[in-house]
Amino acid sequence: MAQPPEFDLSLPYVTPELPGIGGAIRARPELFTVVEVPAYEPLGYGDHIYLSVTKSGKTTRDTQIAIASLLGLRREDVGHAGLKDKNAVSTQTFSILMPANEPMEVAKIIESNLGVAVNWAKRHPKKLRSGHLKGNTFTITVTDPEPSQKIALKRAEGIQSTIAHLGIPNYFGSQRTGKNGGNVLDGYDLIKGNFRERNRWLRRFLVSSYLSHLCNRYLAKRLNEDNFTKLLNGDLAKKHDTGGVFTVENAQSEQPRFERGEISFTAPIYGYKMREAKYEAKELEDSIFAEAGVTLDDLRRVGADGTRRLGRLLPEIAVSEHPEGVTLSFTLPAGGYATVVLREYMKNDMTATEVEVEEPDEEHSEQ
């Protein structure tokens, strides 16, 4: 296994001067809940049945396979928008290709056989696909905080005060990069042609893992160089309300909108078709890619088109006391990682617990 020229997995904090609360997560599934925020509501007609399912102790893939097997369908006939942690209480929607049966009849069969709760069942014309969600709402309790619950609560409130003003870098979490960066290393080897992977899904995932690492390096450098809290000339900025992306021609004039949380800079997911920044922002992006040890020809060979990713998260985080610790409640857009938020509060490695390996999301769908 070759090592990329630039292989630094460390990620700086937005609040390095504020002590963390330590502790642990996922002490019990009910202390880590996630509810999917759908991108659209089912229309009430069509060949697919949409089911809102609440489950615990089951991966999304296990549930997908179990539904298909129970109903005599192919796995690909059961769709979902994203993967949810096994060690959590998660609510998410599945779609089932089943033109004939009544939705509530199917819901009762699934609920009575698979040990999950079905919240509702409605029809829709199209399959639910990966990335078809606005985001996820989390309620997570950090147990056994340090040095005491009372002090930890005050620390968490102090961190929240800073985050509310600055936001958090939209890093990719360890679900993408792998333990000790293992996915990143495999992705680099694959891009450089040091080995071949026949499984198309795994090939795409490993490539996206390496490109996610480069995106993390970009965000880390931006934060370390005090460019996280301001726009740069040439940034490709995204409007939070409409999702529109535009080139920042005059950073000074756009800075007030940035500070009000109306727009944010975007980070590069490198690829041979990626829309590039200009001027000062392009120089920063180019410096990261120059250290990467890969070329655009390498990315073209593995089919990595490239895209942009929102550079900062602006979550509204509610901090509250819990009998076992401190509870954080917040909503993240699709592609955001709860563990990235938690690490800012905990400032230890307890967020890197084992979770279900995710699929490449829509930001990587070109690869």
Image (spheres, rainbow, N blue to C red):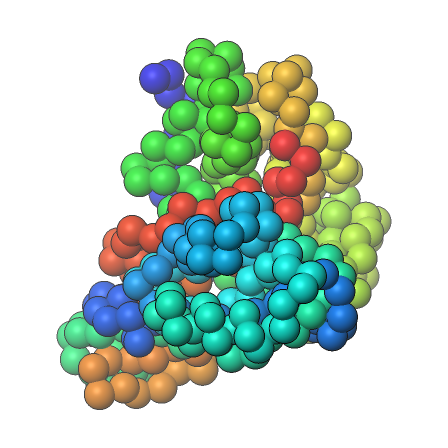
Q: Is residue 118 left or right of residue 262?
A: left
Tell me the quarter of the image containing the N terminus: top left
Q: How many marks?
A: 0
Residue found 31% across the figure and 40% down from its top: 179
Q: Is residue 345 visible?
A: no
Q: Is residue 35 left or right of residue 26?
A: right
Q: Is residue 106 above or below residue 237?
A: below
Give residue 145's quadrant in the image: bottom left
**Where residue 3 sits: x, y (%)?**
37, 20
Q: Is residue 199 above or below residue 96?
A: above
**Where residue 9 sits: x, y (%)?**
37, 39
User: Between residues 71 and 117, which one lies in front from this camera angle?
Assistant: 71
Q: Is residue 43 visible?
A: yes
Residue found 65% across the figure and 25% down from its top: 303
Residue found 30% across the figure and 87% down from its top: 321
Tell me the quarter of the image containing the C terminus: top right
User: Between residues 248 and 57, which one lies in front from this camera angle?
Assistant: 57
**Where residue 185 sits: x, y (%)?**
39, 26
Residue found 52% across the figure and 39% down from its top: 212
**Where residue 163 sits: x, y (%)?**
49, 70
